[in-house]
Amino acid sequence: MALVGFGLTLSVLIVLVAVVFQNAESPFTPIIGLFGFLPFQQMLGETHCYAAIKTNSDDKSQSNCFTVKNGLFERVFSNQSLGKSNTKTGYVIPGLWDGHGHLLQLGELRNSVDLFGAKAMSEVHERIIEYQSHHILAGTSEQWLRGVGWDQATFGKWPSAIDLEINDKFRDLYVMLDRVDVHCIWVSKKVLSLLPNPLPEVPGGEIPAEGIFCDNAMEIVLKHYPEPTVERKTKFIKDAMHELNKFGVVGMHDAGVTPSHLKLYETLSLDENWTVRVYAMIECETRNTFCPNEAIKVETPNGKLRVQSVKLFADGALGSWGSAMIEPYSDKETSSGSLLVNSTTLTQLAVEWAGAGYQVNIHAIGDLANRLAVDAFEESLKSLCPHTSLRDCQSRHRFRIEHAQIIHPDDQRRIRDLGIIPSIQPTHATSDMYYAESRLGKKRTMEEAYRMRSLLPLGPVFGSDFPVEPANVFEGIFAAMTRRNPRTGLDSEGRKDGWYAAEAVTLEDALQGFTVNPAFAAFLEGRAGTIETGHYADWVVLDEPLEALDDESLRFATVRETWVGGKQVYRRPGSEDLPSDAV
Ligand SMILES: *[C@@H]1O[C@H](CO)[C@@H](O)[C@H](O)[C@H]1NC(C)=O
Ligand SMILES: *[C@@H]1O[C@H](CO)[C@@H](O)[C@H](O)[C@H]1NC(C)=O
Ligand SMILES: *[C@@H]1O[C@H](CO)[C@@H](O)[C@H](O)[C@H]1NC(C)=O
Ligand SMILES: [Zn+2]
C-alpha cells in the first residue's frame, strides 16, 4: 500500500513530542523502566486456567493452564486438580500477528470518511457530507478532509475534482480521498490550487483524470499535505491498536514507516498503552533510497517495538493496471504496467541495505516485479555470503516479498530454491478475484496468481494489508481456507466452490501464517507465535475451540479477550468472566 502523508521533520517532531508528554491528558504517558509498570502479583507469577489451550508448539501434550511472570509465560501445564473454580471459561489460542499492515494509516482511516463499499457517487457525497457535519475542522488548509475506499469501477469512469464540489461549502474545502487500494488519491479543486501548473510528469506515476493522482504522481500532492499533529498521530496509533486488539491481534509488521515516525513509535512504545507489538520496516522519507543515517535499529526491552528491516517498492497495484507484468495485460494489451524503480537500482538498493545489516522486504505484485525482486535478493545473497549456500544465507537474512501476488512459474521455482519468504494477504485474493482473471487471462491466473498452498513450504507470512482490507484475522483465515470472500461467503461466481480452490490451505496452515510464520519472519521465533515457557505472554480467548467453528462461524468469529505481555488489553463487552461451572 502507498504511504500517504506523514513526513515530519525530525527536529519539529522532537519538540512536539516533548510538548505532548508534558500534557497530563495525553493518552500515552511515558513510563521508563522495564518492569516498573507490572502489577505486583505479576512479578510473583499469576496462573490462568481455561477449558483448553492450543499452544501451537511442538509439544503436543494437552495443557489448560499457564503461569505468567514479568510478561512472559513461566510455565505451561495441565492441572485438573486446581479445580473448576479456578478454571475460566473459554478456549485459548496464541496471540495473532498480522504480517503486513499499516498502523498509522489504520488509525487515520478510523478518523476519516469511510468510503468502502459506496455504491455510487451519490453515496460518496452523502457519506462525506455526513462526516463533515460532525467534524467541522476537517477540510481546512491545516487539516484536510480525508477519506479512503472509493473505486472508479463503481462510477464506470475515473471521478474528478469537480465531483468534490458537492455544494457551496465544499468548494472551499481541502479534500483528499484514497482509492480502495491506496494507490491513487482524488483531491478537490482547493487542493489542486496549491499545485504547480502545468503539473510535472512523474515517472512511475499517472494522472488519469483532473484531481486523480496515482502511484508516484501522488507525491505531487503529498508535498503540500499538512502533517497531522503529533497529538493526532498519537490518537491514530491508540485507535488503531484498540481496533487490532479487538481482533485478537497482539503484533503486526508495519510495512513502511518513515524514520521520523519510528522516533515517535520509539517514544510511545515505552508506555503500557502501546498494546500491539510492532515489527516495523523502514521506508526512507524518499521512497526507494538508501538512508542508513536516518534509519535506526531498535529493539525495546519490553518487546513492543523492533526495527531491523527496510521496505522497497518495485511496482503498483493490479486494480489500477499499475503492477509490472512480463507480458501485457489481457484486458489492456497496450500496457504491461510500470516499475517504480529499474532493476539496476532495485538490486543496488537491496545489496546496500542487506550489507548494512537490514532484512530487505520488497513490495512486488506483478510477475515482472516479482522476478526483479528475486534477482535483487539473489545478488544480495551472493554478495553477503560468497562462500556459503545462498539458501543458508537466506535463512539468516530472511528476505521477503511483500504481496508476492503474481509470480511466473520459473520464479516460483527460484523462490522455492532460495527459500525467500512470501508475505501474502489472503483477503487480497478474494477481493481481487472478481477482476484478476480479466486482467491476467486464464492461464496466467491459474499458473501464477495468488498462490498460497503451493508456497506453504516457504513458511508464508499472512496479513491483511490493513487498512486496505479489514484487520480481522478471522476473515483472513476464512479467505485462506476457502478462497471465498469473507464478506459474502461466496466465490467470484457466487458459489461456494472457492476461487482456484487448489490453492486453499488448511486451518492449521492458516493459523501458522498468522502466528509462527510472522514471528520467524520478524526474527522472533522462540519469543512469539506459540504458548511456551519463556515466550511473550500474549494470548487470545475464544468462545469455542477454533477447530469447532464451521466456515460460517469462522468468518463471523469474534474474540472474547486479548492479552499482551500478561495484561488484558481487550475484553468483548458483555463477556463477563464466569467460572466454567456457572455456565
Ligand atoms: C492507559 O489507558 C487506560 C484506558 O484508556 C487509562 O485508564 C490509563 O490511564 C492509561 N495509562 C497511561 C499511563 O496513560
Ligand atoms: C496442581 O496444583 C496443586 C495446587 O496448587 C499443586 O500443589 C500441584 O503441584 C499442581 N500439580 C501439577 C502437576 O502442576
Ligand atoms: C535506473 O534508474 C537510475 C535512477 O533513476 C538511473 O540513474 C539509471 O540510469 C537507470 N538505469 C537504467 C539501466 O536504466
Ligand atoms: Zn501494504
Image (spheres, helix red, strand yellow):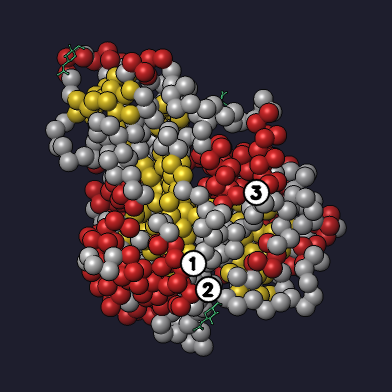
Q: Amino acid at mark 3?
A: Leu
| SS at badge 1 | strand
Q: Are marks 2 and 1 in contact (CB under 8 Å)?
A: yes
- Tell me the quadrant of the picture where the C terminus can be found: top left
The residue located at (21%, 14%) in the rendering is 82
Q: Which residue is mark 2?
A: 340
Which residue is labeled 3 in the image? 10
Q: Is residue 427 visible?
A: no
Could you tell which of marks 3 and 1 lies nearer the N-terminus? 3
- What residue appears at the point 36 percent right and 18 percent down from the top-left corner? 43
Circle on res. 313: 1
Distance between the Cα atoms at labels 2 and 1?
Answer: 7 Å
* Place of residue 473 in the rendered image (x, y in percent of width and height, measured from the top left): 39, 47
Cβ atoms at labels 3 and 1 below 8 Å apart? no
Q: Quadrant of residue 286?
A: bottom right
Q: Amino acid at mark 2?
A: Leu
